[in-house]
Amino acid sequence: MMSFLCGLRLYSAVGYQWFLLSFCSWGIANLTFAQSSIPKTKVALLLSSQGVEQTVSYEVKRGVEVFQVAHPELYQLIKLKMVDTRGSLEQASSLVTNLKEQDFSYVIGLRNGEEALWVAQFAEVNPMLFLSPLSTYSKVTLGKKNSFQIAANEVLQGAALARFSEIDLERKKILILVNDRSVYSQAFAESFIKAIQLKAQIHTEIHHSNGTELRIEELESKLNKFKPDLIVICDELTRSSVLAKYIHKKDPSMPFLTGDIFGNEKAVKSLLKEVPNIRIFYSSLWSGRENTEENRLFKKHYRELWKNDNPSQEAALTFDAFLILTRSLKLSGNSRDLDRVRYFLERTTFETTQGKLDFMSSPTHSPIKNVHIKVTNAKIHKHVKTLRTQWKEKR
């Protein structure tokens, strides 16, 4: 009725003109008030300010800022709270419990596998929807209805790196370094070993450490006896850097292969500055080369905000996580109904920085994605190739 009245031809009578204009203005004002009075959805972002994770968290925050600039109409749907886990599982569990008590039903964040797994398990018993942009530990989503991963998990990365080590690097003797106290390390090593065992005439040896003890004497013995032509490091960034530098100083020609933990350019430059010529190939969770609308938008706004820095995988995947959640919230029309929001998360094909992403093509809430291989050291951070996976529309 209001739009009909607004469309009528205004007659010359001043009083009638005033009535129609006042009526239209009243209707628009009330519509604006109704929209602004809709409560925003409370979303928590979990970060860590400890050690190397500080650099990661810095880029995660940038991802949120870019999303806010690129999609203000979606960002206005949420009320964001950032909380610091300080890299502690105990702190993370306490914070998430408190968030639930404060009526937060949506959580984004965490790279650490142990922390992400705890939150995923908590979200099953105390209904929350959890999106992890950076955790690659497949058990975070395996068998769980309320948790979603944005990154390629360790199964996809392990298979891609096994293929790359055989076909591109042409290596035959691979020493694999595993931290027995890290779920990420164990899962990544297991995925790589399963994939590499399918390759003929490739021999492997495993070196075990326990996180606090690197067992350097045992490592040196295996290096001398086994004489590997490739080192695969399955551990977090700081320990991996220590091991890589030790081996590089003994054999400067030795190449290294690892997972996405080496994707943070600033952290890598800091940790590897003593060995500028080391070669570390790693699987990246994001590539600036993907020619998608969202990737172009993300890179454009990132560079406008921080002209001297390169866009990062942490910022890009955080951007994607907020994009996916807010679009699902918008489609649902009711953020308090978790089942309805989950329905759209599970059945929508999202346009992201890395192209189409859905949670239908995988048996878990972990998407089938391309894996990008890059090479890094203190001087370079360069794309090598993309190993593509096939996306099929579910009919």
Image: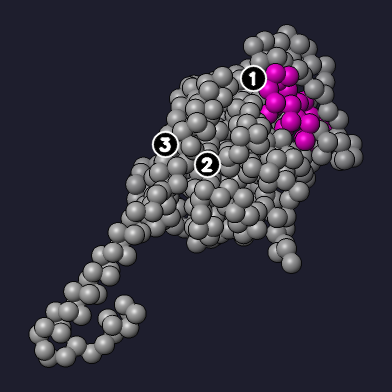
Which residue appears at 20% of the width and 80% of the height?
Answer: 20
The amino acid at mark 1 is: Leu
Pick the front one: 106 or 56: 106
On the question of residue 294 being in view, the answer is no
The amino acid at mark 3 is: Lys
Which residue position holds label 2? Answer: 106
Sequence-earlier tag: 2 or 1:
2
Count neighbours of disc 2 (C-alpha within 10 A) and say few if under 14, some if 14 to 19, many if 20 or more.
many
In the image, taking residue 352 as reference, residue 300 lies left or right, namely: left
Q: Tell me the quarter of the image containing the N terminus.
A: bottom left
Which residue position holds label 3? Answer: 81
Magenta region, residue range: 170-192
Q: Tell me the quarter of the image containing the C terminus.
A: bottom right
Is residue 152 covered in magenta? no
Which residue appears at 43% of the width and 34% of the height?
Answer: 82
Is residue 177 covered in magenta? yes
The relative height of residue 268 versus residue 128 in the rendered view (above or below) is above
In the image, taking residue 280 as reference, residue 86 lies left or right, namely: left
Distance (Cα) linking label 3 and label 1: 37 Å
Sequence-earlier tag: 2 or 3:
3
The quarter of the displayed image where residue 361 is located: bottom right
Coordinates of residue 119 in the picture (x, y in percent) = 60, 31
Count neighbours of disc 1 (C-alpha within 10 A) and say few if under 14, some if 14 to 19, many if 20 or more.
some
